[in-house]
Amino acid sequence: MSSPKILIMSGSSRSGSLNTRLATLAASKLKAAGASVTQISLADFPLPLVDATGFGNHPPEAMKLRELIDAHDGLFIASPEYNAGYAPALKNALDWASVAKPGAPATGLAGKVVAVGGASAGAMGGYRGMTQLRIVLELGLGALVIPEMVAVGGGDAAWNEDGSLKDERTSGFLDALVARLIKVAASG
């Protein structure tokens, strides 16, 4: 089994984001488990709102994001929850990546292995947003979303000083997610 290349992104580019903390922790665990990891910030991909004029008329940042997705075997996406849905900036970035490559299927994630997680100050840890993200990833973009997810509730107080999770059960969910992501991404 080869070492898979995993792209890590947070659906939030806000300074101090709980989801960026989760993405960073996932990146650390993936590296420790032998994956080659690239972590990005959506702030590095300033994209206008996508609409039908985006087909064949994408900004350079959309193509850069699409090329990064194409160059990796799998993705880990940590997304905040906004009004029981996932982050609008993440939706916009994924939509741009799906139309950025002329002649390609309308999805840059077709067959790509994806793991999702979320963190929030609320008790559910972004769970409602993750379920909607899964639907779009699977049905809209054709990704293979692994069943394990990690929801970090009470995110303001969920972290140890070293960046690890305080709750052993939640940490175990992240470990299971990492193991499955590596296994499936390496076999594809």
Image (cartoon, helix red, strand yellow):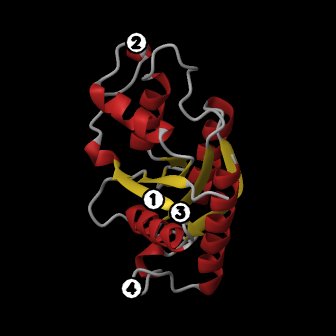
Q: Are marks 4 and 3 in contact (CB under 8 Å)?
A: no
Q: Which residue is mark 2?
A: 56
Disc 4 or 3, which lies upstream in sequence? 3
Disc 3 or 2, which lies upstream in sequence? 3
- Secondary structure found at label 4: loop
Q: Which residue is mark 4?
A: 162
Disc 4 or 1, which lies upstream in sequence? 1
Mark 4 or mark 1, which is nearer to you? 1
Q: What is the count of numbered marks?
A: 4
Q: Which residue is mark 1?
A: 37
Q: Are marks 4 and 2 in contact (CB under 8 Å)?
A: no
Q: In the image, residue 8 lies at what x, y percent?
A: 45, 55
The quadrant in which residue 106 appears is top right
- Secondary structure found at label 2: loop
Pick whichever, 117 or 81, lies toward us.
117
Q: In the image, residue 117 lies at what x, y percent?
A: 56, 60
Q: CA distance from mark 4 to mark 2?
A: 45 Å
Disc 4 or 2, which lies upstream in sequence? 2
Kind of residue at disc 2: Gly
- Secondary structure found at label 1: strand
Q: How many C-alpha atoms fall within 10 Å of the one at disc 2: few (<14), some, or many (≥20)?
A: few
Residue at the (50%, 49%) spot, across then down: 83
Q: CA distance from mark 2 to mark 1?
A: 30 Å
Q: CA distance from mark 3 to mark 1?
A: 6 Å
Labelled disc at residue 135: none
Task: Decide if residue 102 is on the left or right side of residue 181.
Answer: left
